[in-house]
């Protein structure tokens, strides 16, 4: 079975690739989870975040934005001592700030899904890369998303993080054309 090059490192990477990566997500809770995880990944490997994903779910109330938005200084201190997550104060406080921004977007647009998918006109962009070397680190769409999110107060949402997010939640299909998931994801 041929997979995208990046997914051949660990069993966890392969499972994530085979079941989740590139599948269009329209559930607000999962869209928020992935936004926080992509921000946490900055400067680290995605494998590191995948290993800590269940810990993040426990530590961040299963990514319930309403609960996270109300976190106190005591909760921040507890998170800074939680070895199940990346203990980086700016990333932790960004998650709390982003929860507040996320709730504001939901209120304004009816759902975060409506807002975030507008950057690709509501449908996944289908790419056709022969190898991972061809895949860009950002695109005009991820740059527009980054600018829009930052304007709304979101943090850890640069163009590269936004493009990784777009890949993760299926806004773009960046499976290599030789990958068994390319056609499957394209058909979704």
Image (cartoon, grey):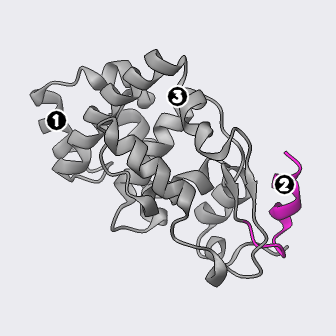
Q: Which residues are magenta?
A: 175-188
Q: Position of residue 142 (x, y in %)?
A: 51, 56
- Using residue 38 as the reference point, say whether residue 131 is left or right of it: right
Which residue is found at the position 64% from the left and 56% from the top?
A: 16
Image check: 123 left or right of 77?
A: right
Residue depicted at x 89% and y 50%:
187
44 lies above or below 79: below
- What residue is shown with label 3? 112
Quarter of the view holding residue 56: top left
- The numbered disc on residue 186 is 2
Q: Nearer the viewer, residue 141 or 91?
A: 141
Q: CA distance from mark 2 to mark 3?
A: 23 Å
Tell me the CA gap for discs 3 and 1: 25 Å
Would you say residue 50 is visible in this rendering? Answer: no
**Residue 126 in the image: above or below residue 83:** below
Say which quarter of the image contains residue 178.
bottom right
Q: Nearer the viewer, mark 3 or mark 1?
A: 3
Task: Quadrant for the N terminus, please.
Answer: bottom right
Alpha-carbon span between mark 1 and mark 2:
41 Å
Under circle 2, the secondary element is helix
Q: Position of residue 31 (x, y in %)?
A: 54, 37
The residue under label 1 is 76
Residue 7 falls within the magenta-colored stretch: no
Residue 43 appears anywhere in the view: yes
Q: Secondary structure at mark 1?
A: helix
Q: Residues within 10 Å of mark 3 (few under 14, many from 20)?
A: many
The spot of residue 106 in percent (x, y) is: 47, 21
Q: Is residue 23 above or below residue 25?
A: below
Please say whether residue 180 is one of the residues in the magenta stretch.
yes
């Amino acid at each position: 079975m041929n997979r995208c090059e990046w997914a051949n490192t660990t069993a966890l990477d392969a499972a994530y690739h085979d079941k989740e990566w590139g599948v269009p997500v329209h559930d607000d809770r999962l869209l928020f989870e992935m936004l926080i995880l992509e921000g946490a990944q900055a400067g680290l490997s995605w494998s590191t975040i995948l290993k800590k994903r269940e810990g993040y779910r426990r530590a961040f109330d299963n990514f319930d934005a309403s609960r996270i938005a109300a976190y106190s200084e005591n909760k921040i201190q507890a998170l800074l001592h939680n070895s199940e997550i990346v203990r980086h104060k700016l990333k932790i406080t960004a998650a709390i700030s982003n929860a507040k921004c996320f709730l504001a977007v939901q209120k304004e647009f009816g759902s975060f899904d409506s807002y975030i998918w507008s950057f690709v006109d509501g449908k996944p962009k289908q790419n056709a890369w022969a190898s991972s070397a061809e895949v860009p680190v950002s695109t005009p769409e991820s740059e527009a998303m980054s600018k829009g999110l930052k304007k709304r107060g979101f943090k850890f949402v640069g163009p590269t993080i936004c493009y990784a997010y777009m890949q993760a939640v299926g806004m773009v299909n960046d499976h290599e054309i030789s990958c068994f998931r390319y056609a499957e994801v394209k058909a979704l």
